[in-house]
Amino acid sequence: MNLILLGPPGAGKGTQAVQIAEAFGLLHLSSGDILRAERKARTELGQKAQVLMDRGALVPDDLILAMMVEHIGRAAERNGFLLDGFPRTLAQAQGLKSRLESAKMRLDHVVSVEVEDSEIVTRLTGRLYCPECGRTYHEKFSPPQVAGVCDVNGEKLLRRKDDTPEVVRQRLETYHRETKPLIAYYGEQGLLRSVSGVGEIDEVTARIKEACGA
Ligand code: AP5
């Protein structure tokens, strides 16, 4: 099964992607995580992306498309792929469609996870992550067992640079302008399923599984 999780920043795409990828044996590809790994490794792509990411702007379509197509090639070893954070513009979606057609692959479902902007600001400004294993927490909604420390490896938890209130507002504007049109694009192709991203994390996971026919 090949799946896209669409949704605004902070909708819970990353949180849900981990559960869904494990349940279906999918390769989880988060464009944001891949870009952060490129930054950490100080590659040319990572350095180009850094300034744009920190101010909540998008990385150019051609760079993202080439990066993601390379990773999608590895999905053959699994039961399919789950894309999280990509595509994010109409040009990326059209580029993905033509690359998949050339590789004789297809999308099965696009699940749009819906959350109001006001809830998103609360979620992102309270988000914490482990720099070692990447696990995500929330101060109130999914706190670690010991405040400020990762449950898995005891590392000190950090906040993402782009989770300040100003940058979150910018990311939301970018989402509404560039990414929201993909809901209509995939709706016209009969691939779109919409689920509410509000409620307990496990409840949202169950809704996504149901939307995928499980
Ligand atoms: P990226 O890393 O993809 O960020 P994003 O899309 O803005 O999404 P987030 O990771 O912030 O949120 P999420 O939906 O995964 O939510 P999460 O599960 O963490 O992209 C970062 C940047 O990279 C972009 O701004 C851009 O510059 C660049 N980029 C990436 N992809 C690109 C592309 N395709 N093209 C161009 N540029 C690109 O949850 C958020 C918080 O809420 C957590 O604290 C979590 O614990 C909590 N939470 C989750 N679910 C619930 C729930 N049900 N109830 C309460 N709290 C919850």
Image (tube, grey):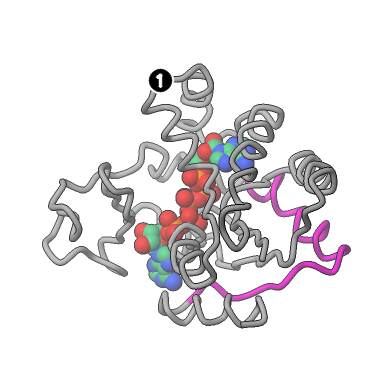
**Is 195 placed above or below 90 here?**
below
Residue farthest to the top, as pictured: 44
**Is 176 placed above or below 66 here?**
below
* 92 left or right, relative to 133: right
- Does the magenta portion include 117? no
Magenta residues, as a range? 175-198
Give the quadrant of residue 102: top right
* 213 left or right, relative to 196: right
In the rendered image, is residue 134 in sight? Answer: yes
Q: Measured from the top left, where is residue 19 in percent x and y? A: 45, 68
Q: Measured from the top left, where is residue 98 in percent x and y? A: 84, 43
Q: Measured from the top left, where is residue 209 in percent x and y? A: 58, 78
Q: Measured from the top left, where is residue 161 in percent x and y? A: 36, 37
Tell me the quadrant of the picture where the N terminus can be found. bottom right
Tell me the quadrant of the picture where the C terminus can be found. bottom right
Query: Mark 1 belongs to which amino acid?
Result: Arg
